Amino acid sequence: MLVCHKWYAIGSQAASLWMDIDCARHGAFAPVLLTRSLGAPIRLCGLLNPQTDNMLSAVVADNGPRVCELDLWVGSKLSHTTSILQSILAVDMPRLRILSVSRLGSGSANVNGLTVVADPDAPARFPALEAMLLGSFLFVPAHALPQLTHLHLAWLDDIDPSRILDLLRNTPALQVLDVIQSSEYTSPQQPVKPRWASVFLPRLHSVYLWSLASTTVHALMTHLEAPSLASVRLESIRAKSGALVSTPLIPDTLAARTVTRLAFDLNGVFSSFCAAFHGPDLSLSMDIKASGMQDTAQASRWAFDDFPAILSLSGVDELHFQAHVWPDAGADLLLHLAARMPAVSTLVVKHSRSTSTGDDDTEGLMDLARAVVALLSSDDPVLFPSLAHLELIVGDIPEGFCEILAPALAQRALDGRRLRKLRVRLDYAYQARLAMRWMFEAEPDYSGTGVYEHVDSVKIDKKKSIGRAGDEDGEELSNMVGWGEWRDSVQPARHEYWYR
């Protein structure tokens, strides 16, 4: 039995020699390996350069029906790149499951994106293609790809977004779309933009866009009709002056989705925004960087006017709000958003501060407390009337912090809206910077501040015990993975075609 297993392993390894054909490594020996594989499906990879383009083109042309995986790298010095790739992709490959085409130097400043449009008269069909990865290269097939479920596009500099939509029109079964690292497309003639037709993708579940211009995101996302779309991640989206305000970044089909949790992170004075919307059938996160703006008026207008209109906030039950600048930017925006979320019962407010500096931000922490007081004591209109759980995450708890909160908590209780739980949590990220100072400080006593009398349950972290085992309340954050992330949130579709 052991002998049989050993010979089986040897035979399997030998068979892989004939099935995994690397034209760059095997060179002239590649055709010999192909003849010994006896017609079995093959995984073919190679480098297209002036020395290998004819041989590799011939290998694909002669073995198209056998190719199940094709991985091509295109050299930057290859002349007639478009015609060579067009001829290779004109070969009929009925078994092809995975197609990967990338140009050497993808992502560098001197390599622009290349678009290859298939000849409508070419016989090429890819009925079994499941996944396609394209780097600095875009392939627009002439026929539908009925089985394609995963599409990854990278470094599409100088490629017209309308061409990407042309590709998507041929992917009716698409489930996962990734587009990363692309500069803003500028048409040489600057014509009037046509009204592009929308693309219907009934099975699309997950979209991941990273390091794109907001205009590109707008051009792609607003032309998608995706009723099954549930996971959208927009990361490092660059918005230039005039391009951010009133520019929709998500499909209209998401407008009717219910949002029950919202996390918002305001960085600086409206220099960047991070937001996460979560609901029973949606997980939407966006990270927008306002670059190149002469002033903050446009960015702040987006935060105050356009952001609350992205999705309905009336059903939000849990709000996490983080800001770097208090009181002005953070306090004003928090109060503005609160007026649109009457159903919030859990509020988490975090004071974000660089952990690399040695400067204390006592005044900023006190300003945060004053902003929370303004929210709790507002009566025209009453903000967060259903609020039951308030949590403040801070880097330090200065003297007088709780005293500022106490009158507003008392008024809240007097008005019949008494909080059930108050939690003041020390941010663990500050421990390394402040632990030595805290070690020699007396632990403050908050019993005389009045906060305990006006809230059902109060817990305030002790500085000397921060980070110790058992100090955290497991039930409080049991459903949280990180800031703006929850364990029961809709997750993006998982796959093993490639790694991000």
Image: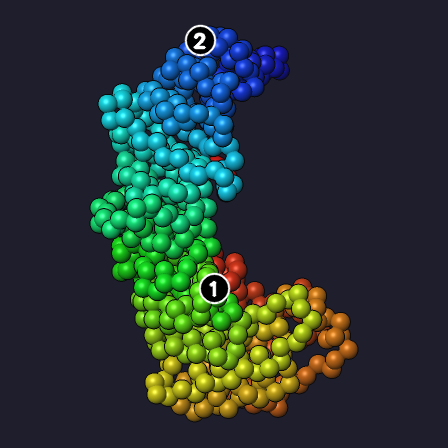
| Image coords of residue 400 (percent x, y) | 61, 87
Horizontal side of 214 relative to 349 (left or right) equals: left
Callout 2: 10 Å neighbours few (<14), some, many (20+)? few
Horizontal side of 334 relative to 143 (left or right) equals: right
| Image coords of residue 391 (percent x, y) | 52, 74
Q: Which residue is mark 2?
A: 38
Task: Name the kind of residue labelled 2 in the image.
Answer: Leu
Quadrant where the N terminus is found in the figure: top right
The residue sitting at 46% across, 81% down in the picture is: 419
Callout 1: 10 Å neighbours few (<14), some, many (20+)? many
Q: Quadrant of residue 247?
A: bottom left
| Image coords of residue 51 (percent x, y) | 51, 18
Q: Quadrant of residue 101?
A: top left
Q: Is residue 191 visible?
A: yes
Disc 1 is placed on an element classified as strand
Q: How many marks?
A: 2
In 3D space, how far apart are the residues under numbered discs 1 and 2 (Cα atoms)?
58 Å
Q: Which residue is mark 1?
A: 272
- 408 in relation to 138, above or below: below
| Image coords of residue 30 (percent x, y) | 51, 13
Task: Name the kind of residue labelled 1 in the image.
Answer: Ser
- 454 in relation to 6, above or below: below
Q: Quadrant of residue 10?
A: top right
* First in residue order: circle 1 vs circle 2: 2
The residue sitting at 27% across, 60% down in the picture is: 256
- 34 in relation to 123, above or below: above
The residue sitting at 30% across, 49% down in the picture is: 190
- Which label is found at residue 304? none
